[in-house]
Image: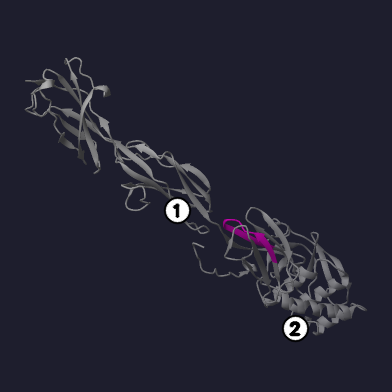
Amino acid sequence: MALTMGHRAIRWITAVTAVILLTASLTAPPTASARATRDSGYSINAKPGWIGGYKMRGKRVYRTTASKPVVGKYRPVKLARKSPARARAAWILSKYGARGSRTQAAAVDAAVLHLLAGKSYRLNGSKGAARIRQVGGNRGYVRSYARQMLTNARAQSGPYRTKLTGPDRAVAGSGAKLTFTIRSRSGNGVFGLPVVFTYGNGARVTAYTNRNGVASATVTVQAGVIAARAAVSKVPDWRLRIRKAKRRASSAVAIAGHTSVIRAKTSIIGTTTQSVRVSNGASRIMVGQVLGGSYTITGGAGAREVRRTVYGPASASAAGCVGSPAFSSSTTTSTSSSWPLPSYKPTRSGYYRWGVYAGASISTPAASTCGAPVKVQRRASISQARPDGMDQSVPTNRPFGVNVRVSGFDRWETHQAIGRVYGPFETREAARCVEARKWRTVNRTIKQDGTYALPRVTAGAAMSGKFFIWQSSLSTGELILGNNSACGVIFKIVQ
């Protein structure tokens, strides 16, 4: 991979920081009050004459003060202070208290008061044991069931520690295993809870925790940094939900059957590759024209810098994307697509290339390409003139010719300046620069702008009275294009 990152620390999330979905009893208006009635349990002689649960606003509740009855109106639900005993009592109420037989309700009552009401109300305490004995034939079951509840609560109650783990990085399209773990305060796995895993674009898998408190799911990795989430529901409470009585003579009650949802989150970096391609608009252009084209980025994920750079002018087509750039511009992309290259007009002749660099993201290594060369040419100009001091009438056998002025070179390049002499013509008006009347050709080598004297020619006595006309041209080179002068410097041969 192009990028690396250290192994992420796995955060343990306690239930106290979890998102808790409260039942309607917690969202009751602050002024709401309620009354309780006996629901499931046994009548006994010990105060207040009942072992088991009560019904309040459609929910089962249990006393938290052993000697006080459940009478009168009650205040809205509040969370009790934290303590290990209250956490175990909350777990028992959540796990066993909402439903079941009256024998189970009596066991819940006995276990809760064992934890909350003092030594005498423990299962083997004087008052706790007496209450259980008054159940009658089911007292042995109530006692053993209450003991089992207390044992389970010690092992399974919160606050809970959760974690969601997966690979830090994986190749997009491959499978990745997500593992969610929930453990009790004592470090034991919490068994049998449904865990909903969600990932990326809506992938959703439900699994259940095993005896180690572990649930897992496999998802198909998506490109980029993609969030993975787990939500475990039906988690038994570890905070008591209390309704206090409006009358001091009445016992407070704890809500049974309430559970919560705990959420955890991680992310997987789905790695992928990208490629870059450049398409030139033309293989050859002139100076001042747009060096056009397009580039295509395929693959990749995440926001990436894109640099479009022109390299040149180079003297040879073999030169790559090296040296100081002639032009550069940057943008960003998060997608795969094709885009036009920026507008750039070369001002000098030479070979140019577009280089495109697509930067790295957290999930994608960088990629670049160097496009094919584009030849950028320039056209030079050539003009001719009669040399200073040379008359248009030239005696026979005396050298005559023209000087040429060359301009438009922006580099050293070898060319030929060529002079063509047409004639002989009987009159000045008949002189023309036509191939059929070409009489002499001369040339010289040039490499840059300047004024150059072309080689001279002579005409013998037989040409006396005849007219000759000149036209000059510049040959075409690799990068500098040639040109022709006007047809028009005329000489007359005289005796």
Q: Quadrant of residue 484?
A: top left
Q: Is residue 366 above or below residue 120?
A: above
Q: Quadrant of residue 132?
A: bottom right
Looking at the rendered structure, the kind of residue marked 2 is Lys
Mark yes or no: residue 245 visible: no
Q: Which mark is residue 119?
A: 2
Q: Which residues are magenta?
A: 216-231
Residue located beneath label 1 in the image: 368
**Distance in Å between CA atoms under marks 1 and 2:** 77 Å
- x, y percentage for residue 473? 24, 31
Q: Which mark is residue 349?
A: none
Is 392 situated left or right of 172 in this image? left
Q: Quadrant of residue 189?
A: bottom right
- x, y percentage for residue 16? 63, 68
Q: Nearer the viewer, residue 291 or 418?
A: 418
- Of all residues, the one furthest to the front in this rendering is 462
The residue located at (53%, 48%) in the rendering is 336
Local SS, label 2: helix
Main secondary structure type of the part rendered in magenta: strand
Looking at the rendered structure, the kind of residue marked 1 is Ser
Mark yes or no: residue 424 visible: yes
The residue located at (71%, 57%) in the rendering is 28
Residue 228 part of the magenta segment:
yes
